[in-house]
Image (spheres, helix red, strand yellow):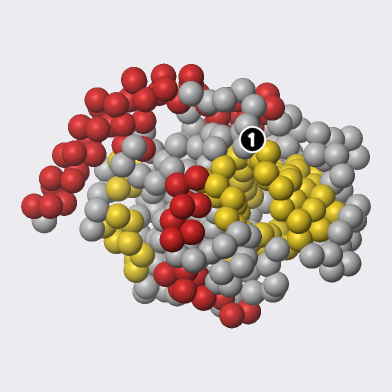
Amino acid sequence: MRFARLLQTCLLFAAMCGAAGLAQADATATPAQGETFSLQLAATGAAVGAESGTVQFIGTATVIIRYQGFTILTDPNFLHKGGHVHLGYGLTSERKTNPAINFEDLPPIDLVVLSHFHDDHFDKLVQEKLNRATPIVSTKEAGERLKRLGFTRTFGLSTWDRLEVSKGGARMRVTATPGRHGPAGVAVLLPKTMGSVLDFGANPDVPDYRMYISGDTLVYDDIHAIPQRFPNIDLALLHLGGTRILGVLKVTMDGKDGVRMMQVIRPKKTVPIHYNDYDVFKSPLEDFAREVKAAGLERDVVYLAHGETYAFRRVQR
């Protein structure tokens, strides 16, 4: 109890002291153009130019994206109800739900997109069982941790870095976008995080389909650069939940933040995820739904229960 109070005091102090300076650093340290990396996957009859694709919600921030022959897994968390994850500084959180499928039932995965290295996004089971040759794209910090765990095909990105992926004749690009896991002063105590834009098709500048995944972030100034660089986002997957450390400091978007993010990013459709799976999530999906209704955005949101799938079609630009 004494440790928890001390940590709470430290976090609050960091939030107050670091807000102004770190906010300015976020706005000025972002490079105009990032580096480009490449990944070539074995061709397995990829559906080049396919008209339709799907997003299946597994639970927390875990989804399976299938499109144009690619199968992409995000933030893999397959811990079951009652299990605990470690969040650092001696803090833990209990899972309140089960994943829609078990880890053992996953299809063959071409690429993992990992917003950051936290147990509720890359749990101990996944760390133990995921094939070490699975390509994983994440932050540079997470990439180094993954390498130490023995993963051999990691791509650590800084903001605006991009990974060009090919599979036979199919093409896609993953671009790291700004993300900050909490208020400016607190974010330095938490893992680096990133959002990502997935552009599918031969020409990523005029993609067949454009998807944005927020990662664990709040809405802050740097987010406004995303729609400037990536207009016409077709689908946004937003990490909500209003996660609070020690019940005090908010480190992921709550319902109101989720609507603000929609208004900034301006996606055609939004799927909320990461909202009811752990006891540190303090803003239920109902908060977001209420804010969506108040903002008149109900037609733009698709609500998925665990295991449900959203089907989308190629967009004519």
239 to the left or right of 308: left
Q: Mark 1: few, some, or many residues within 10 Å (few <14, many ≥20)?
A: few
Q: Is residue 276 visible?
A: no
- Residue 253 image position (x, y, % from top left): 46, 41
Residue 81 position in % (x across, y down):
42, 73
- The correct choice, above or below, for 190 with respect to 127 in the image is above
State the residue at coordinates (18%, 39%): 10
The residue located at (37%, 25%) in the rendering is 22
Q: Which image quadrant for residue 117?
A: bottom left
- The image quarter containing residue 109 is bottom right
Residue located at (33% from left, 25% from top): 19
Q: Which residue is mark 1?
A: 35
Q: What is the secondary structure assignment of the residue under circle 1?
A: loop
Please tell me in which quadrant of the rendered image residue 130 appears.
bottom right
Q: Quadrant of the C terminus?
A: top right
Name the spot of residue 290 as percent of width and height, x first.
53, 43
Query: Residue 314: where, in percent of width, then height?
Result: 86, 48
Q: Is 116 placed above or below 84 here? A: above
